[in-house]
Amino acid sequence: MPAFVRAVLTGGASFPGGELFDEIALWEPDPTRRHTTGRLAVELAGALGRPGVVTLSADAEEAFTGASFVFSAVRVGGDQGRVIDEQVALKRGLVGQETTGPGGAMMALRTIPVVLEYSEMLRRCSPEAVLINFTNPAGAITQALSLHGRVPVVGVCDTPGGALERLADFLDVLPGETSWLYSGLNHLGWVTSFKVAGEERIEDLLHRYEELQRFDHRFAAFDAEMVRKVGAIPTEYVFYFYDPRRYVDGVSRAGSSRGQDVLRLNEELLAGISRAFDKGGVKEAWSTYSTVLGVRRDTYMRTDTEGDNRQAQARAVRAERAPEQLEEAKIGGYEGVALRVIAGLTSRQPARVIVNTRNAGSAVGFLDPDDVVEVPSYVYGGGIQPLAVGELPRPARGLVTQVKEYERALVEAAVTGDAGLAEIALALHPLVPGISSAKELLAEYRELHGPHLAYLK
């Protein structure tokens, strides 16, 4: 959130509509975070010449009241909950990851009842507000909110946009010179067309895929020949479906999972910000924040795919990084997608943006109209209109169909509190080997997560 605040307040002309914000109201129930990252976000506004524009509260209703847009980024059970999600799966030789497989299912089951409660609060406090969902697993959470939340909702993720930008960089062209087709579900999507000045280049990209892998690590996880056979370029999270054994082996070699790494980094982050405020104030706190966040960003997915020693890799990244200067902000990542959505919905700059939204008009023809899909959409003052995306290759369609069946069952289990349906949802997931494993997994997760899953009967 401090990075988002800085991006908004320094974005200037790069964000049409930035002047719309007369207040950014932050809600943080945890006192440690309020006094570290929350305080940093508030004091950044003052340091950037906008004192008072950022407010901080421990009361959700206070923060919601009067809101036009609300960002949802919650982690029920905290970082330790993520570690449990990963480790229960990994010790069985299954993918342990926060957005997919057993771990993603448990994060969704813990989270859906909570975000639905908050959506009701939001409907009471600010009935015209649009909920912009960052919370993972973004596809399943957005599906639950779309079907049951009774507030306008759109899900955002920077994965597809980041992949498209890097494809343009690889071909040494500006993103504005390109047009493309992309579709799928959140963290399960493919680029099926990539044109430069009207000329199709997808075959060139597939032919040169080994070069692309050397150019950017997000493409390096995949078997190049398999990608060529499928005939579309997968975004990085498809790796967990295409090569789960390689992931599990890599985590074993690395000695820790991503959740354990992030837990350590977040503890370092909060302690470092606290010390920095004691010693030097907002600029020193920002330096600490940007350094640790940079290490976290630069090690993202590398050890999942490469199996290197994670702490050694983090030390190497840290040694190469210089802290970002407070005034050098550029808008990108999650905040960039979210701000483009806001600019479009306020008619400041209607845009074509990849978002998670209902499959209205059957943009993805083999899924239901109420299914939430991740597709390019036209975002404008009248709302969000998903665009036609063409056909996915048959292997991709098969995977998307199976995962969507799992998501439908998972949302129903969370809404009804039906433990048996939660087991069936798990068994439907391609990364879970059947109902016996699903029952065993859910039993252990319920024991370890305690009250967060106690509603399942």
Image: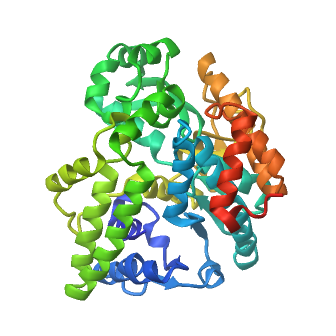
Q: Is residue 370 above or below residue 235?
A: below
Residue at 46% x, 47% y is 158
Q: Could you tell whether 355 is left or right of 332 in the image?
A: right
| Image height of 198 relative to 100, above or below | above
* Location of residue 429 (image quadrant): top right
Quadrant (top left/top right/bottom left/bottom right) for the N terminus:
bottom left
Is residue 101 found left or right of 51 in the rendered image?
right
Q: Can residue 144 be seen at all in this image of the molecule?
A: yes
The x, y position of residue 62, in whole percent, is 62, 85
Q: In the rendered view, tell whether residue 34 sits above or below residue 431.
A: below
Residue 107 coordinates in the image, percent (x, y):
62, 54
Q: Residue 445 is drawn in which quadrant?
A: bottom right
Give me the residue at 42% from left, 24% from top.
195
In this view, the residue in front, 368 or 400, is: 400
Q: Is residue 218 above or below residue 332?
A: above
Identify the image quadrant of the C terminus: bottom right
Q: Residue at image x 18%, y 49%?
A: 316
Q: Quick check: can you spot residue 173?
A: no
Task: Tell me if 266 is positioned left or right of 341 in this view.
Answer: left
Instruction: Give percent across and percent down for residue 328.
Output: 23, 63
Q: Position of residue 363 (x, y in %)?
A: 68, 33
- The colour style of the image is rainbow
Pick whichever, 436 or 109, lies toward us.
436
Residue at 38% x, 48% y is 256
Q: How many marks?
A: 0
